[in-house]
Image (cartoon, helix red, strand yellow):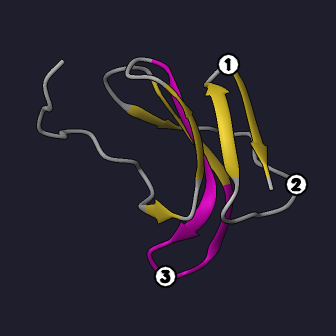
Amino acid sequence: MAWTTETNGLNTARYATAQGGGSTDSICITGFDDSSTRLNTAETWNGNAWTQETATLNTDRIDQGGGGNSSDAIGFA
């Protein structure tokens, strides 16, 4: 597998996230946006594009661990 140029970034730039998955089925959960606002949202990756999910976490969180994929994920402190 070779590195490729990234063409489809997250819909909301974020850092200090939890994430899980692989190259065709991933999730990015919570974190901070570029103005340092805590996020309680998630985005999923299907191998081609990121999708902002409509469901949200009850509480915004940062610096979590994460695992799983977009259909079966966990975030933990």
Whether 38 is among the magenta residues is: yes
- Find residue 35 and name its label: 3
75 left or right of 27 in image: right
Position in image of residue 57 (x %, y %) = 80, 50
20 left or right of 3 in image: right
Q: Earlier in the sequence, mark 1 or mark 3?
A: 3
Q: Is residue 15 above or below residue 24?
A: below
Residue beneath the point at 45% across and 23% down: 22
Cα separation between marks 3 and 2: 21 Å
Type of amino acid at the residue the image marks with label 2: Asn
Q: Is residue 29 above or below residue 48?
A: below
- Find residue 47 and name its label: none
Q: Which residues are magenta?
A: 25-40
Residue beneath the point at 44% across and 75% down: 34
Cα separation between marks 2 and 1: 18 Å
Q: Nearer the viewer, residue 47 or 62?
A: 62
Q: Earlier in the sequence, mark 3 or mark 2?
A: 3
Type of amino acid at the residue the image marks with label 1: Ser
Q: Earlier in the sequence, mark 2 or mark 1?
A: 2
Q: Which residue is mark 1?
A: 71
**Element type at mark 3:** loop
Q: Nearer the viewer, residue 53 or 66?
A: 66
Residue beneath the point at 13% across and 24% down: 2
